[in-house]
Amino acid sequence: MEKKIIKTDILIIGGGTAGCYAAIYLGENCNYSVAVVDKAAIKRSGCLSAGVNALNAYITEGHQPIDYVEYASKDAEGIVREDLLLDISERLNKVTHDMENRGLTILKDEKGNYVSRGWRNLKINGENIKPLLAKEVLKQKNVKVYEHINITDLRSDGSVRGAYGFGINDGVFYEFKSKAVLIATGGASGLYRPNNPEGQAHQMWYSPFNTGAGYCMGIISGAEMTTFEMRFIALRCKDTIAPTGTIAQGAGAKQVNSFGEIYEDKYGLTTSQRLWGTVTENSEGRGPCYLKTTGIDKEKENELLKAYLNMAPMQTLKWAATKGPSEKDVEIEGTEPYVVGGHTASGFWVDNKRMTTLKGLFAAGDVAGGAPQKYVTGALAEGEIAAEGIIEYIEKEYDDKENEGLLSGLSNTCKEGYEKGLKRKSVLEGTRRYRVRDLERAMQKIMDEYAGGIKTDYKYTVHGLDIADERIGELSKMLDYTDINDTHDLLELYELRERLVVARVLIAHLKVREETRWHSFQENADHPEKSPEFDCYINSYMKDGRITVIKRKLVKV
Amino acid sequence: MGAVTDRAKCIGCGRCIDVCPGNVIRKDEQGKAYLKYESDCWSCAACVKECPMKAIYLRLPPEYGGTGADMYARKNKNITTWEIVRADGEVIRYTTDTEEANKY
């Protein structure tokens, strides 16, 4: 395997929303060299590939940033880092205006004021938001973009000083050496068996290419993680798993059961309660459930079809090929659970500058914990906060004395790991071998059945978690017996490793929260009530392969 | 199912391969693009909008209802023209403009 060493001051892993915005900020506000590395091309990588239909985090006139903190905290039953939420909230409008100046279209009235959808949402055309961000990144003279490179491990000797990865197309071993690292790899999808069967398995809400890489790198390097047990399960249009907000908030459609009864008021209006309501209506025999859209006029229907082209084109295709929303209510269902810090509080435990518990490693966006309801603007804001933190770190704290022996050892281990993977076919000839995909499917089945997936209406028991933990441990040992033919197979192997590590930590977190804090998101059948004893964060870290779980006191503002 | 290629129309420019957020498209022996990892497609349509030849399109999976339909797109700066071809032969067209915000 050819080796390339790339030296840069700042390494950004993941060129999605937060990573790109951090790169733009660093380009415009400092002279440090910056490398953005992504496993795809930043033009469409990350969560915003197809586009986005609204900015769901904006402080409209008459409201204050603290209102947003209160909203997010209430929605998360108090398990949030209010300090992190507040500094994000204070920047939401600034980053929105900045994106508008960079070319994002936001709906305005005749007077030039934004048209909001509720008190914290703006209507936009976000089809081109990712190409727009990518274009801004490429304008920066001190920023270089490295695409189609999969990063798997951090380069750390106590301080994080870069990362290791391999080129998916060129098969090169890359060693990035930097003074600080921003991890912005997104959350984790594909842990649980998805809604759709094989063939359409990736027809999911969250990017199927967000495989928990950042969480995994952090976990195996000993970083502290928070609130993994607060899973995110989205309520979505059936089959296409397209967003419902545009129909519910935008077109004012209510959730109804198969008898036409509006049921949402019965269960409460937090994100998890809306989902739980739908699950319960189904399980008690009043499903399927719908968003009541029949009767909307043709003009509205046409606008809805166009709106979905800008974020989830499969939904428009479905409507056009079958019946549109004016003729047929839109059926809804819950997705499989994800771990994603942009919607819930799962992720790296960070300080106010977004530095993780590993010196020199910063986190922003879906991979950073503590601050749910970030959405796009929150991820942008957090990218900027982390970028500021990194500049300060390099100027005040960074120590250039590297432990060379340790780092060259790490580099060799990593490279040998890839080479061993690529040579595996000949080594394993005649012995037991498995396809990565079969192991992935096995993991998803185990998580679905024993760790609160769709199969059990998202409920879990401690007994089930013990089975899941044992089975995930077994699967982890089978990684060495997978069939690898090329660097794409190697990519799949490392993605599965990431998911298995995240799954183990998730199981540990679910087990410790001996209450039900959020219906469906974390529904412990052994402890179905909420308990004040768990007004705390559940955090964890891994050392020598063992997970230790700790409780931390809530941070309020 | 999701994105599907039409090898007869493909000119092998590789734009779909580069833009795909999941690295799922590759070239065959003739240098034509195809969905090597078909079941990994997210149906984001990044490739569909990128293709200059309408050689890649979204296909409605059979589980989603209807009797089948395909969707093509062509993007020219801020304007995207979408073409949905239904099983009954009817063609439905939409035009979206990134300079025009969604109404909902």
Image (cartoon, helix red, strand yellow):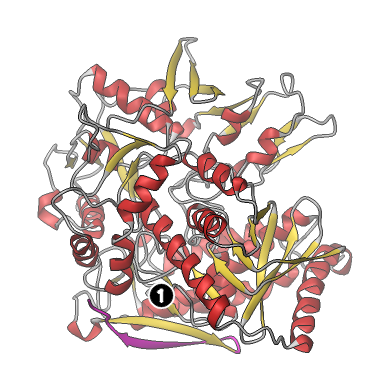
Label 1 SS: helix
Is residue A550 part of the magenta span, yes or no? yes
Does residue B15 appear to the left or right of A49 in the view shown? right
Q: Residue at x 49, y 16 (%)?
A: B87
Crowd around label 1: few <14 · some 14–19 · many ≥20 (10 Å):
some
Where is residue B3, by image quadrant? top right
Q: Which residues are magenta?
A: A544-557
**Residue nearer the viewer, A10 or A547:** A10
Quadrant location of the N terminus of chain B in the rendered image: top right
- Work out whether residue A44 can be spotted: no
Q: Foreground: B24 or B86?
A: B24
Image coordinates for residue A399, horizontal then vertical, percent: 63, 85
Vertical relation: A556 (above or below) A379: below
Residue picked out by circle 1: A464
- Give coordinates of residue A114: x percent, y percent: 25, 38
Quarter of the image for residue B93 reads top left
